[in-house]
Structure formats: structure tokens, C-alpha cells
Image: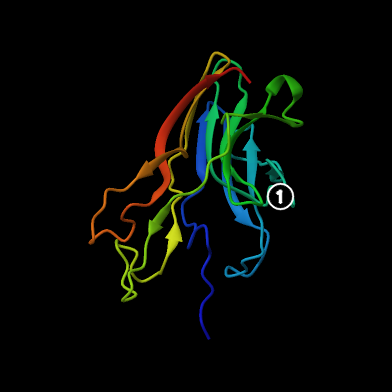
Amino acid sequence: GTIPRYRQSWWLGYQPFVAAHGDLVAVAWATSTSADPYDQASGSRVLLTVSRDGGSSWTPPYVVHPESVSDPQHVEPALAIDAATRDIHVSYYVQHADGSIDVDLATLRESDNYSSFRTKRLTSSPSTIPPSVVVRADLSATNGDAITGPCYSLGHYMQARAENGTVFATWTDARNTFTHATNPLDPLSGQTHSQPDVYFRAVRP
């Protein structure tokens, strides 16, 4: 049979994100809600576990943001610990049911005994994912992902740092658009689509 192809991404494969300050250690990662890696109907969630004794013991995984019908996907977490406040911050992409993307920041506060997340939206508006692998008429692809077929771009471009109560976050989104010049060799000749750019925001969650 044919292996199913995801519309928004072919595969998510990367290592968990780790942050530490003194005896406080945190690990964040994304996971599917399905045991089947090819289940196109599955959601995804970001999990976080915390050690307050240098890694000797760990909390059960927190669900940073549960999946829902309106927001089924949560991926690509970045993690920061504020040395001054010992608060833990996780930024991540949220994909809505219509395929558009936002970026959220979730915070666990030491003053709350790391009991619950406070979530803040970093993006001012959702963006759509631009095409990254375009199949030609002869079914050959236009970049290095030739073996995977067509997909859409969402790279590992999320970072977060925290200092003295302020979180500094960077990410890519595609709220702007780009129109290709007319070129018979370009499979997107003359088309307009979303354009990925790098964004930065400093926030006090």
C-alpha cells in the first residue's frame, strides 16, 4: 500500500529541549496523541517534566497545552529558565484546525509551586504555512526532500531565553506574502504565497 503523506509536515524528528539552572532542570518535548506514526487524524501536545533536585527525581509530565478540536497540534517547544525568578517558560507552535499557525508561551511560576501554566499568545495574527517541496509534472521534487513527496514548511526555528522576569522569544511565521517572478523553470512561477520571516518579541508573562 501507499504510505500516507501529511499535508502540513512529513515528519517531526528532533531531540527534547532541556534547560537547567542550579538544581532546577526542565525537559520539554512534543508527542503525538496516536501510537500510529502515520495517523493523519492524530493531535499533538507538548509535555514538560521538572526536577528540583538536580535530576534525582522528576515530576510526572505536565501537558503544556492539551490538543482540542480547534487547536489539534502543538509542536516544536523551546524552553527557558529565569535564573532570577526560577520560573519555567515554554514557547511552541499551535496549529489550528484550519491549518494556520500561532505561537504561544506557557509559564510555570515557582511562586505558584509550579502548579499550573499561564499562557500568552506571542503572535499578533495566525499565518499560513508556505509550500516547501513542490512536485513537478514529472513527479520529481524541487529540493532535497525528493524521496518524501510534497509537504509544507515548519522548521525547528523556535528559541526562548529569560532574564529578570522578561522572556525573549524568536520564531518564524509567514504572515507576509511573496510573489514569484515569472520563470518557466519555477514551478511556482507567478504565484503568491506566504513568506517565512523571523520574528522576535520580549514579554513579561
Is residue 54 visible in the rendered structure shown here? no
In the picture, the quarter occupied by the C terminus is: top right
Q: Is 204 on the left-hand or right-hand side of 70?
A: left
Check the image and report above or below for 108 versus 43: above
Q: Nearer the viewer, residue 147 or 52?
A: 147
| Rendered image quadrant of residue 54 | top right
Relative image position of residue 72 (x, y in whole percent): 67, 52
* Residue type for callout 1: Glu
For numbered disc 1, what is the local secondary structure? loop
**In-front residue for pair 171/24:** 171
Q: Is the residue 56 above or below the residue 136 in the image?
A: above
What residue appears at the point 47 percent right and 57 percent down from the top-left corner?
Answer: 13
| Quarter of the image where one finds residue 166 | top right
Question: Where is 1 relative to 201, above or below?
Answer: below
Label 1 crowd (10 A; few <14 / some 14-19 / many >=20): many
User: Is residue 25 found left or right of 154 in the rendered image?
Assistant: right
Residue 119: image location, x then y, percent: 68, 30
Which residue is painted at 69% across and 46% down in the image? 61
- Whole-percent x, y for residue 131 in the image: 42, 55
Q: Nearer the viewer, residue 102 or 37?
A: 102
User: Looking at the image, is 150 positioned above or below residue 80?
Assistant: below
The residue that label 1 is drawn on is: 67
Colour scheme of this structure image?
rainbow
Q: Position of residue 187 (x, y in %)?
A: 31, 61
Q: Which residue is drawn at 46% across and 35% down?
A: 171
Q: Residue at x 58, y 70 (%)?
A: 38
Image mark count:
1
Residue 184 appears anywhere in the view: yes
